[in-house]
Image (cartoon, rainbow, N blue to C red):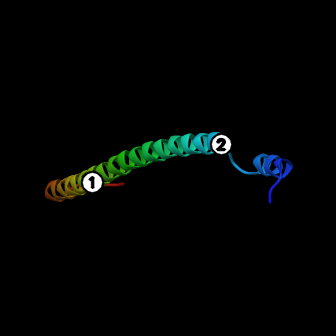
Amino acid sequence: MLTNEDIKKLSEVLATKEDIKDLKQDVDGLQEMVQALVVSVDKLVKAVADLSTEYAAITNKVDRHEKWFQQIADKLGMKLEY
């Protein structure tokens, strides 16, 4: 059978209800932070994807313009230097 002294020793080592409540609050706070980070990363990924799409469109446009400049130079008998 457990004595009062054994119970005191156990209560010093084992977590109390208050310890568990504090731990739960800490975990809840961490969950909120992780969720906020996930939302931020999602926004960042979308911005990078949008920039990538825009970059591809601009690259195509520049290539098209370079081709037109070359065609104009050929018709005018000019040599373009890069």
| SS at circle 2 | helix
Which numbered tag is attached to residue 75? Answer: none
In-image side of 61 versus 23 (left or right):
left
| SS at circle 1 | helix
In-image side of 55 versus 9 (left or right):
left
Q: Residue furthest left?
A: 75
In-image side of 31 versus 43 (left or right):
right
Residue nearest the observer in this picture, 58 or 82: 58
Marks 2 and 1 in Cβ contact (< 8 Å): no
For marks 2 and 1, give the CA distance.
51 Å
- At label 2, the amino acid type is Asp
Q: Which residue lies furthest to the right in this view?
A: 5
> How would you rate the neighbour count of disc 1 (Cα within 10 Å): few for under 14, some for 14-19, many for 20 or more?
few
The quadrant of the image that shows the C terminus is: bottom left
- At label 1, the amino acid type is Thr
Residue shown at 25% from the left, 52% from the top? 62
The quadrant of the image that shows the N terminus is: bottom right
Give the image location of residue 18, x and y in percent: 63, 39
Q: Mark 2 points at which residue?
A: 19
Residue nearest the observer in this picture, 12 or 7: 7
Q: Dividing the picture into quarters, in which one does residue 72 lie?
A: bottom left
Instruction: Compare marks 2 and 1 and give the one earlier in the sequence.
Output: 2
Q: Mark 1 points at which residue?
A: 53
Q: Which of marks 2 and 1 is in front?
A: 2
Give the image location of residue 7, x and y in percent: 79, 50
Give the image location of residue 29, x and y in percent: 52, 40
> How would you rate the neighbour count of disc 2 (Cα within 10 Å): few for under 14, some for 14-19, many for 20 or more?
few
